[in-house]
Image (spheres, helix red, strand yellow):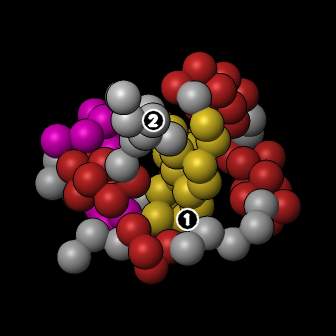
Amino acid sequence: MSAAPAPWYLYMVETAKGKLYTGITTDVHRRIAQHEAGRGAKALRGCGPLALRHFEAVGSQGEALRLEAAIKRLSAAQKRAWLQRRPPSEETACTPS
């Protein structure tokens, strides 16, 4: 019997200068740690410290990719409005130690 696939998460971080970055992963804690260490997305290198603003379980990788693409098409103001409409994340549960 095989294990169920890991859920995919959509996450959003804010850079020190206020830029919002959206990504997907199966492990938010690991991914944020990678970004903080400069091993994540090139767009975030040298932009720290980073603050996790939102994350949520999305479902499959395909669903996560579609939602990520839709959010990345939004303007900065639209992204902030989207964040305001989302329920609060359990941010402390995924803050890297």
* Dot 2 amino acid type: Ala
Considering only vertical position in the picture, is 21 above or below 64? below
The amino acid type found where label 1 is placed reads Arg
Residue at point 68%, 31% (across, down): 67
Q: Along the horizontal axis of the image, is 10 left or right of 84?
A: left
Q: Secondary structure at mark 1?
A: strand
**Residue 92 in which image quadrant:** bottom left
Q: Which residue is mark 2?
A: 4
Q: Which mark lies nearer to you, 1 or 2?
A: 2
First in sequence, mark 1 or 2: give its number: 2
Queried whether the magenta region covers residue 49, the answer comes back as yes
Q: Quadrant of residue 85?
A: bottom right
Give neighbour class at mark 1: few <14, some 14-19, many 20+ (Cα, 10 Å).
some
SS label for mark 2: loop
Mostly what secondary structure, the magenta segment? loop
Res 30 visible: yes
Residue displayed at 21% across by 49% down: 34
- Dot label at residue 53: 1
Tell me residue 18's x, y (percent).
52, 61
Q: Are marks 1 and 2 in contact (CB under 8 Å)?
A: no
